[in-house]
Image (tube, helix red, strand yellow):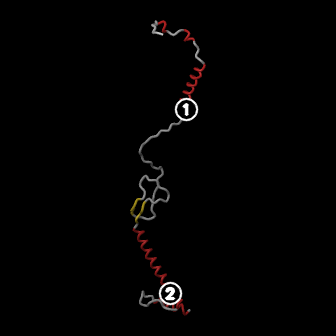
Amino acid sequence: MGKQIKTLEQLKDSRLLYEKKLPRFGYIISLTVALLLVAVTVWGIHTPKTYVIKSTGVIQSNNKNYVMSPYTGKISEMKASEGAVVEKGDVLFQVQSTDLNLQVTQLEEQKKSYEMRAAQFQKLVKSIKDDRNYFDLTAEGVTVHSVTSNTLRDA
């Protein structure tokens, strides 16, 4: 087949091509594509969309939370920084109190005094059991205990 020169009339589609029926398979494909486009459009409109927004900011609670110490003093150490996640029972601050330090010192002195008295009573019990005076009259001036042990022994 060689090259043929055609006229404008020959280039026009024939009436047979226009009157030809589209095959059934073409209708099925066209209808399927149209329905698929409608379904995707409806799904896109009604589906909730998730938006990711990256930003910086500070979140504050509507309710104020107060942190109080049972005694007065100066904050000596911060254990939690601002914005940190904390749970119930976590140590947030360390408070240094002069009143509390004085009470601790007094209680330690009382403890030592009671320990000395307990040791003296143990010595007294041992003196009574052994029927001997373990108390030295020159040490600590504890002559009262020896009199007490004699009084208890006579009873």
Q: Residue at x 47, y 79 (%)?
A: 115
Report which residue position mark 2 lands on. 124
Q: Amino acid at mark 2?
A: Leu
**Picture coordinates of residue 60 (x, y %)?**
45, 49
- Between 4 and 14, the residue placed more toward the observer is 4
When the figure is inspected, residue 145 is found, relative to residue 24, above or below; the finding is below
- Between 74 and 117, the residue placed more toward the observer is 117
- Between 41 and 77, the residue placed more toward the observer is 41
**Picture coordinates of residue 128 (x, y %)?**
52, 89
Q: Amino acid at mark 1?
A: Trp
Residue 27, located in which quarter of the rendered image?
top right
Total labels: the figure holds: 2
At mark 2, the secondary structure is: helix
Looking at the image, which residue sits at the far front? 1
Q: Is residue 145 left or right of residue 24?
A: left
When the figure is inspected, residue 113 is found, relative to residue 16, above or below; the finding is below
**Picture coordinates of residue 6 (x, y %)?**
46, 7
At mark 1, the secondary structure is: helix
Instruction: Report crowding for label 2: few under 14, some 14 to 19, many 20 or more residues within 10 A (C-alpha).
Output: many
Earlier residue among tags 2 and 1: 1
Looking at the image, which residue sits at the far right? 24
When the figure is inspected, residue 13 is found, relative to residue 85, above or below; the finding is above
When the figure is inspected, residue 128 is found, relative to residue 82, above or below; the finding is below
Q: Nearer the viewer, mark 2 or mark 1?
A: 1
Q: Quadrant of the C terminus?
A: bottom right
**Picture coordinates of residue 122 (x, y %)?**
50, 84
- Between 71 and 133, the residue placed more toward the observer is 133
Residue 94, located in which quarter of the rendered image?
bottom left
Q: Residue at x 40, y 59 (%)?
A: 78
Label for residue 43?
Answer: 1
